Image (tube, rainbow, N blue to C red):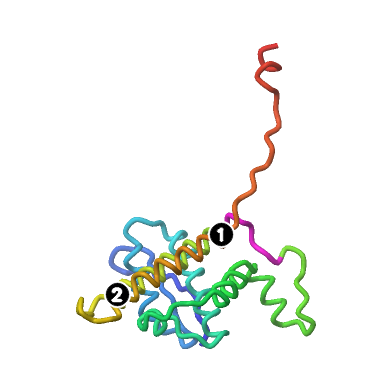
Amino acid sequence: MSYNTQIIKLEDSGERVTIIVDSGGMPVDLPSRYLLQKRDNRSAKTLSNLATNICQLYRWSEDNGHDIEARIKSGEVLGITEIDSLIRYLRLNRRQASLIENSKNNVVPMGAYVSGAMLTQKIDAVKGYLEWLGRVALEGRLITDPYCQVIAPAIKDLNDQLDIRKTPAKSAPRYGLTMGEQRF
């Protein structure tokens, strides 16, 4: 199944709504509900970027044979090797990654990776969505249900593991006159 973002213009208000659709053009339920919930305080472009990052999460899970929603509902979130695999997948520039997938030698071309700030943005988008999935999984459960005690700590541990793997942004040295030179 292929996941893509689609922007729909509402007829009555003219507002743009971002959803995630499958290869048949049908909306995917949970990611689309998540994006519809987020549209109150975000611009259409921000929601489009968020949807693109969530699509990337779903493509990674499909490529690796995982069902993200079922894993979160069961309390069995991603392991360390799966998190590392996800980060490697998020780090790739999608335009360059398609060239890698289509080539026979799997050589990574120059410029195939996103910047540290972009990777941080992608990780934050994935973290927010997985946290929301955890809350949805807990929604219909009783407090006495054993999964209630498992899901929330598992999501927190997953978020901590993702935070550790963020790439710190590099700041360029500042060029200009020193204070003494400015006074002179």
Name the spot of residue 134 as percent of width and height, x first. 35, 73
As for residue 171 lying within the magenta part, the answer is no
> Residue at (35%, 62%) from the top-left corner?
39
> Residue at (76%, 82%) from the top-left corner?
103
Name the spot of residue 140 as percent of width and height, x first. 23, 79
The numbered disc on residue 149 is 2
Which residue occupies the foreground of this view, 180 or 37? Answer: 180
- Left or right: 28 as drawn, with respect to 184: left
As for residue 114 lying within the magenta part, the answer is yes
The local secondary structure at tag 2 comes to helix
The image quadrant of residue 151 is bottom left
Q: Distance between the residues labelled 2 and 1?
A: 27 Å
The local secondary structure at tag 1 comes to loop
Which residue occupies the foreground of this view, 85 or 80? Answer: 80
Q: Tell me the quarter of the image containing the C terminus.
A: top right
Number of numbered callouts drawn: 2
Q: Which of marks 2 and 1 is in front?
A: 2
**Nearer the N terminus, badge 2 or badge 1?**
2
Name the spot of residue 49 as percent of width and height, x first. 49, 63
Q: Residues within 10 Å of mark 2 (few under 14, many from 20)?
A: few
> Residue at (51%, 75%) from the top-left corner?
57
The image quadrant of residue 118 is bottom right
Residue 72 versus residue 153 in the image, above or below: below
Q: Label 1: which residue?
A: 166
Name the spot of residue 75 as percent of width and height, x first. 37, 80
- Look at the image and give the residue range highlighted in magenta: 112-118
Q: What residue type is labelled 2?
A: Gln
Q: Which amino acid does label 1 sit on?
A: Lys
The numbered disc on residue 72 is none
State the residue lying farthest toward the top: 184
Q: Residues within 10 Å of mark 1 (few under 14, many from 20)?
A: some
